[in-house]
Amino acid sequence: MSGEFLRFESVSKGFPGVQALNDVTFGVNRGSVHALVGENGAGKSTLLKILSGACRPDSGSLIIGNDAMSFASPIAAIRLGVSVIYQELHLVPELSVAENVFLGHLPNRFGWTKPAEMFDNTAAKLSEVGIQVDPRAKVGTLPLAQRQMVEIAKALSHDARVFAFDEPTSSLSAREVARLFAIIQELKRRDKVILYVSHRMGEVFSLCDSITVLRDGEHVLTTDKLSDHSPRDVVRFMVGREIDDIYGFRERERRGVALQVMELVAPGLSSPASLTVRSGEIVGVFGLVGAGRTELMKGICGASRAKSGTVLVDGSTRQLRSTADAIRAGIALCPEDRKDEGILVLRSVKENENLSARRKHANLGFIINERWERKNAQAQVDRLRVRTPSIDQPVGLLSGGNQQKVVLGRWLSENVRIMLLDEPTRGIDVGAKREIYDVIFDLAESGVGVLLVSSELPEVLGVCDRVLVMREGRIVAQFDRSEATQELLMKAALPAGDSEDEIA
Amino acid sequence: MTPRQLWETTGMLVVFVAFVLVLSASVENFATAINIRTILVSVSVVGMVACTMLFCLAGGDFDLSVGSTVALGGVLAAIVITQTGSVAYAVLIPMAAGALVGLVNGFFIAKVGINALITTLATMQIVRGSAQLASEGSSIGISDEGFVALGQSVWFGLPSPVWIMLACFVIFGLLLNRTIFGRNTLAVGGSPEAARLAGIAVSRTKMIIFTLQGAVAAFAGVILASRVTSGQPTAGLGLELQVISACVLGGVSLTGGIGTITGVIVGVLIMGVLENAMGLLNIPAFWKLVITGTVLLLAVTLDRLKHRAILRRKTS
């Protein structure tokens, strides 16, 4: 083992409404595999983005070798020997393996490519670390695991010294994982710095030498001796946090079943999903990114075409072929991707509030009732305390929290029985969050059933009466408010392969 | 209203008024009743078609087949009036044919998911070819007085095509601003996914837009045929680009979600006035093209700057 080569020194980075990284300091040695773990939103992705030059820290520095680096762009990072290999690979599917490996610096003479040299060099790079891929194959025809190998070869072609892997095994089979690990071991033997981001404790413990744990943008732990800790310790470090009551939980009466979903088979779900929500109940849906939570919501509200299954609202079966059907049945969705799916950025608050409910108030069924629309928009703005100069302001100019309130207001104008909220407080500052929780409790008190998707454990525990946990496209566990803990939820949400005894 | 909002809503109108004042003072024979009437008649076809092109663009698509549909409308009108002598048939049958063209466009764009450029590029040729086939390649003269009256009457000092264009402005302005269909059009163009999740039938809205577009283009062709007393298979060549230019000059966004009828009116008039003034000044035809293109590019750049503030917020 050689000494420290890569170091994050007091790195901080904030985005509007959230401090993604706060004074994070840790170092990584050459010739070692260093795990980086944390919940969704702990700051891992931001750290990788800083490493790859995709964004700059607000303060602090990144030290590689003995030099403090400030990457102006991803290209600068690659030139200086840093390669980040993301979940979504950045390859050109129409080009050959070799062209991808040398993309941006094809062997050439006065601009004329030298194909023979390119293919030979690629073959050399590939075999160097034991990768078996045909340099002439078109990347688009390769299975995902092999494309990942092409990414690694591409990094080698840039003489990368730092390799960062972002959840590299999330869609690999056991055999492919073994092959990837062999290559990572080979990189380690060659004295490279390897940063390994993963949720899978089993992999982290079998592959990595050292570990850093992040939580809410704060550095929690870095240790060179991973073997001194158990997976259970690490999970506790990931989630162990004080929960202040910023949620304002209110007990309320829960009545009959408002929503019953039976054996729903929808795109993105790996097995049929069943669940119930009572009138007045708030049910959380927790899971890691990619667990199928958004897909479940879209299946329930008719936004994706369910293959089979039954949805009952207040006991009667409803055919939901489109979102319009769902809205008529009383099911509404506040989507996760607020800017692309929730609001019309360039249109006014008034337009956004009335997008759906206006049809019920139109004259002769098709002429806009301008008076009602102004009144309704103003009423929702007042009720939800949307901070906007007027209802004619384009929604794109409001803050994230106020945009979310506008989307909520759209559904308050309808007679909603079931509200599906997909990450309703993502990217929203704490004060506005509390206002959104208040709206959620108000809704539930008025008899609406709420399904709340969230990646934030404290939020799920603080707001929900009951929590469903999703993993790999299915609902795998259910906890009552009284029995749910951060550890239990996290354990249920972590991918299979980390078998029970490893965590427990 | 802040100065900024005032500029956003009336900026192009101010530019237009200033433009007209300058031309009135500097170009001989510009500010005369006859010349103004000439300008209005010359933009009447573009103006009518621009009304529905506004919906197309605001809904996030565009339509290149309108020029061909104008020709088809005129040719069919000439054939029908010669065969039947019925003015009603000579208007309604071409409009039905145009609506069918639009429906086909809408079907391929909204249901099959082929992009608007390819779909309407194909139908542009198919429809042009059909107009040529129907007329056997030559223009068809019209002598029916009742039909000719459609495009050549003069009411209150203005020719009928101008009144029809004004009626289109009013009807489609109301449709855009005062009906659910109009507001849905803007929502669909602004963000199809947000519109869909809000319960708006996105593909149905698009199919209606294209069907309307086809019917109106064919109707404009009928009026044109009446005005020039013949159905010409070569009518409306390049019209689609004039119409789209006029809309864009009027601040309609090519990426959808933004568009006003007042903007379109101003855009249509700017195009007409510019063309007319260049004619009066005897500017050579080649220079006309250079100037029209430059004006278009300038107008779009201005528009881009206008919306940049909001778009920048969106991507941050």
Image (tube, coloured by chain):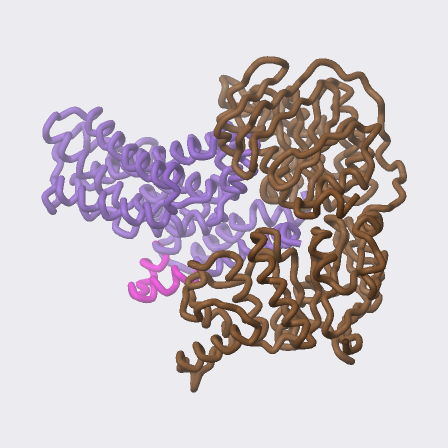
Chain colours: A brown, B purple
Figure check: A367 above or below B48:
above
Residue A369 quadrant: top right
Q: In which quarter of the view is residue A355 placed?
A: top right
Per the picture, the main secondary structure of the magenta-coloured stretch is helix
User: Where does the image place residue A455, in percent across and percent down from the top left?
Assistant: 72, 42
Percent across and percent down for residue A243 are 88, 40
Q: Position of residue A502 (x, y in %)?
A: 75, 48
Q: Nearer the viewer, residue A246 or B299?
A: A246
Q: Is residue A204 visible?
A: yes
Report the magenta residues as a range: B276-295
- What x and y, as percent, mark residue A67? 76, 79
Q: Residue at x 39, y 49 (%)?
A: B244
Horizontal side, residue A205 vs residue A186: left or right: right
Front position in the image: A358 or A283: A283
Image quadrant occupied by the C terminus of chain B: bottom right
Q: Can residue A486 be found in the magenta stretch?
A: no
